[in-house]
Amino acid sequence: MWIEAEPVYGALVSLAIGLIIGLERGWQVRQLGDNQRIAGMRTYGLIGLLGGVCALLLPTLGAWLALFGLLTVVTGCGLSVWLAQRWQGEFGLTSSVAMVLTYLLGLMSVLQSPSEAVACAVLAALLMGLKGKIQQGMLFLSELEFHATLRFLLISLVLLPVLPDTEMGPLNAFNPFKIWLMVVVIAGISFCGHFAVRLLGTRSGLVLTSMLAGLASSTALTLQFARLNKEQGGLERLLATGILLAGATMWLRLLALVLIIHGELALRLAVPLLLLAAIVYGFAFWFWRQREEMLDGPVQPETRNPLDLATAIKFGLLLALIGFMATLLQSKVGNSGVYLLSLVSGITDVDAITLSLSQLAQKELALEVAARGILLAGLVNSLVKGVLALVIGGRSLGRRVLLPYLVSILLILPLVLMT
């Protein structure tokens, strides 16, 4: 059947589509004189309505009518380009493409889905309206940042979706999708952190990056900031603040994950997790308040490489290796070694063990065992991040990160044993 929408409704939608796109195009040329405007809101409205009428007449006159309408619009586009170049001395194809799109969306509103056609029209108008912002963005990007952006799109939108999300290899311990996902997360933190610093400055940019990284991978951010401190130095307090902010946010992330799966277990973990977050946030705020010493360092770190892909791949391979060791240990010890498994899992990742124990707590695993296992994994993960900051970032950064983690562990350990 040619027509799925009601005839009158489809025609009205096709007209509305033209008016939506015409509104944006008319606003762009609002300051030009009447004899300088090639096409305005009325013209685009008529083009959209033309598409709707052609679609309505298809059952009677045949498909050639739609092609004739398209040729008419294309001819009009060519004329508008010629007139724009003659009157305004400009050569642009945006308006011409918008005319063709308006006609096609008019057809679509009658022949297929009116709601989807309207959505496409709104998106097109929004994209065209962002012309100034897009041009500013192009001027903002350096050549190195432009190529880094393309590489990040390659690893995240091209390579990641095609990798198999299944366990394979010895003991089925390797999942290519999850391993590469961690590579994307680590590279993404480096990528976003670079632009956050450029846009907001050192302090605000690194703090924003840290808070967001705490929702994804505080371990990856620790590695990135430790490497940055080793390369440049002079930002120990600020980088320690960022690492601690991410580490504190990790505890809140774990609480949210448990709450989604098992409300009673989340209630049992609420006090220790919130207390851990408060302690680490307190140290981070203390370092942040010491701004006098921060001012002695450089105003903005020189992040030479916006996308540190090599470090991300190395760290992803390291996580895969340690994950294999954890799987091997689980196969040897069995399901009864929950605590031992939590300690080993916490070396690389806390989300996986948290989700697993929360699900097991809904079945045969006791709540206190699941709660202790999750806390142990998180505490080990905090120690690992402190050691990474010390070994990679140097003594000055390491002690500022490791000390708050040790204090939080010592204060919370009695509560863990009583949980």
Image: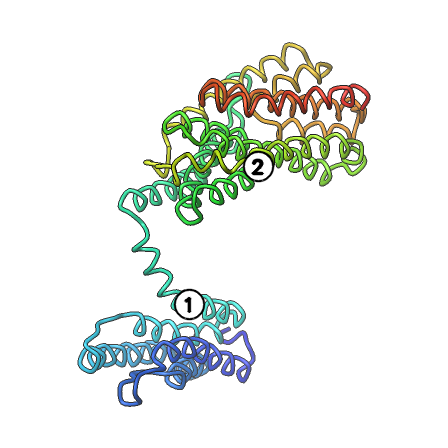
Q: Position of residue 186 (x, y in %)?
A: 46, 33
Quarter location, residue 332: top right
> In the picture, which quadrant includes the C terminus?
top right
The residue tagged 1 is 124
Q: Position of residue 220 (x, y in %)?
A: 50, 30
Which residue type carries mark 2?
A: Gly
* Mark 2 lies on residue: 214
- Whether residue 178 sits left or right of residue 414 in the image: it is left
Q: Is residue 287 above or below residue 325?
A: below
Residue, x 69% and y 30% (percent of image)?
276
Q: Residue at x 70, y 17 (%)?
A: 339
- Give the spatial CA distance, label 1 vs label 2: 35 Å
Q: Nearer the viewer, residue 290 or 327?
A: 290
Q: Nearer the viewer, residue 30 or 37?
A: 30
Label 1 vs label 2, nearer the camera:
2
Callout 2: SS: helix
Left or right of residue 296: residue 143 = left
* Residue with the most extreme front position: 292
Question: Residue at 60% of width from left, 37% of height from top?
Answer: 285
> As shown in the figure, which amino acid type bears the numbered disc 1?
Ala
Precedes in sequence: disc 1 or disc 2: 1
Q: Secondary structure at mark 1?
A: helix
Count the numbered circles shown: 2
Numbered label attached to residue 364: none
Q: Relative to 346, is 100 above or below? A: below
Residue 387 at what x, y percent from top left? Answer: 53, 19
**Residue 154, can we see it?**
yes
